[in-house]
Amino acid sequence: MNWKIKVQNPAFWISMVIGIAVIIGTYFGISAPDLTSWLIVTNTLGAAIASPYVCLTILIYVLGLFIDLSTIGFKDSAVTIAKTSIDQTAQDVINLQLKQASLKAQEATALKDTYTEKVV
């Protein structure tokens, strides 16, 4: 998995924060109007950390954020794994891979030609 790319995406962090807040709020029956002081927030977070069920639920949720549902299994696609920046598109990655493959083919041809000249 290309974790570096996933954590660069603001949508990942927004999804994580909202998901964790919903899990905790649902478990403890808290809604937004109930959060009237920081003491309530910290007490609720402390209770959530103390609850194995809530921690396990959050862990499963966070693991789900890393799974690429557009591929088979739990791996990212080859294009996603090859990305080095969040700004790269799939087409950018494919073009770079084609360029690298072309350069390797040219190097192999040059090496073959050099070897052939030495043998002849």
Image: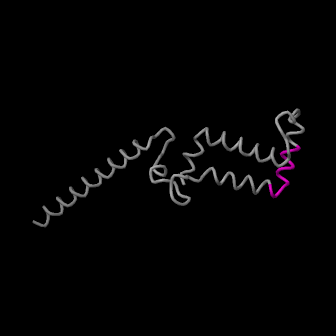
Residue farthest toward the bottom in the current orientation of the protein:
119
User: Residue 84, percent across and down?
Assistant: 48, 45
Front in this rendered view, residue 8 or 26: 26
Q: Residue at 58% across / 41% down in the picture? A: 8
Is 103 situated left or right of 116 in this image? Answer: right
User: Residue 61, percent across and down?
Assistant: 69, 52
Is 84 located above or below residue 115 in the figure?
above
Q: Which residues are magenta?
A: 43-53
Is residue 47 part of the magenta span, yes or no? yes
Q: Quadrant of residue 52?
A: bottom right
Q: Residue at 88% across / 33% down in the picture? A: 37
Is residue 63 part of the magenta span, yes or no? no
Front in this rendered view, residue 33 or 81: 33
Q: Quadrant of residue 115?
A: bottom left
Is 40 located above or below residue 120 in the figure?
above
Q: Residue at 28% across / 50% down in the picture? A: 102
- Check the picture and name the quadrant holding the N terminus: bottom right
- Check the picture and name the quadrant holding the C terminus: bottom left
Main secondary-structure element of the magenta-colored stretch: helix
How many marks the image carries: the answer is 0
Front in this rendered view, residue 118 or 60: 60
Indicate the colouring scheme: one colour
User: Residue 99, percent across and down?
Assistant: 32, 47
Is 54 situated left or right of 66 in this image? Answer: right
User: Residue 82, percent across and down?
Assistant: 45, 50
Is 21 situated left or right of 84 in this image? Answer: right
Q: Residue at 33% across / 49% down in the picture? A: 98
